[in-house]
Image (tube, grey):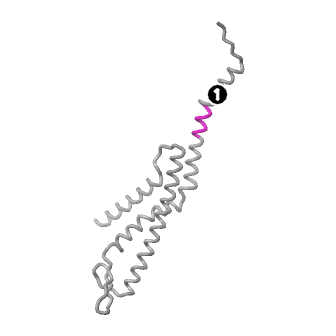
């Protein structure tokens, strides 16, 4: 029994093997490298980092200033404004509400920006089958934890 193999057949098999076992893995490594470079350069920017560091401070300010009972009651032709069970003037109440609404707006914009970027990175990692955790989520959790530790140290 005789087997006839041409030189072209052997060359074709060798090229397929080199392409599959050498070039494809190199291409995938290069693709992953470029993906992480793009994430580092275009997604995780200074603006994102500053917003991640700002958000815990905003939450702390919200919790210290605006968590409490706020009420407005009317009776006998008189309106009573209360903040934390303390009666205040209408001007003080309006200023409190204005400041609270402004802070709430800033907090909403900040967390929306962070979540948008985090969702983009999560989608990219899922699409390109990266098994790494979302770095923005880790940065955000670390910033929240740092602020929590700072507040605990201050309260001691």
Query: Is 6 rendered above or below residue 134?
Result: above
Query: Is 16 rendered above or below residue 42?
Result: above
Residue 56 drawn at (x, y percent):
41, 64
Dominant secondary structure (helix, strand or loop) of the stretch shown in magenta = helix
Query: Is 149 rendered above or below residue 22?
Result: below
Query: Is 16 rendered above or below residue 46?
Result: above
* Most foreground residue, 54 or 1: 1
Residue 24 drawn at (x, y percent):
60, 34
Q: Local crowd at mark 1 within 10 Å, few (<14), some, or many (≥20)? A: few
The residue that appears at 60% across and 30% down in the rendered structure is 20
Residue 89 drawn at (x, y percent):
35, 87
The residue that appears at 33% across and 72% down in the rendered structure is 67
Quadrant for the C terminus, please. bottom left
* Most foreground residue, 76 or 63: 76
**In this picture, residue 153 sits left or right of residue 137:** left
- Residue numbers of the magenta segment: 22-29
* Most foreground residue, 144 or 18: 18
Q: Tell me which corner region of the image, top left, top right, bottom left or bottom right, holds residue 2.
A: top right
Furthest-top residue in view?
Answer: 1
* Residue position marked by numbered label 1 in the rendering: 16
Q: Secondary structure at mark 1?
A: helix
Residue 104 within the magenta-colored segment of the rendering:
no
Residue 38 drawn at (x, y percent):
58, 51
The residue that appears at 34% across and 65% down in the rendered structure is 151
* Most foreground residue, 120 or 60: 120
């Amino acid at each position: 029994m005789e087997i006839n193999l041409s030189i072209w057949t052997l060359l074709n098999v060798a090229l397929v093997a080199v392409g599959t076992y050498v070039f494809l893995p190199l291409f995938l490594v290069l693709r992953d490298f470029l993906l992480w470079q793009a994430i580092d350069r275009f997604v995780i920017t200074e603006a994102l980092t500053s917003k991640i560091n700002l958000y815990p401070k905003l939450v702390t300010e919200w919790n210290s200033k605006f968590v409490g009972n706020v009420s407005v009651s009317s009776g006998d032709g008189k309106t009573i404004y209360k903040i934390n069970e303390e009666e205040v003037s209408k001007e003080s109440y309006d200023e409190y509400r204005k400041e609270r609404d402004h802070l709430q707006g800033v907090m909403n914009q900040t967390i929306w920006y962070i979540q948008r970027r985090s969702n983009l990175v999560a989608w990219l990692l899922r699409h390109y089958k990266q098994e790494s955790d979302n770095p923005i989520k880790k940065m955000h959790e670390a910033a929240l934890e740092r602020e929590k530790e700072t507040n605990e140290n201050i309260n001691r």
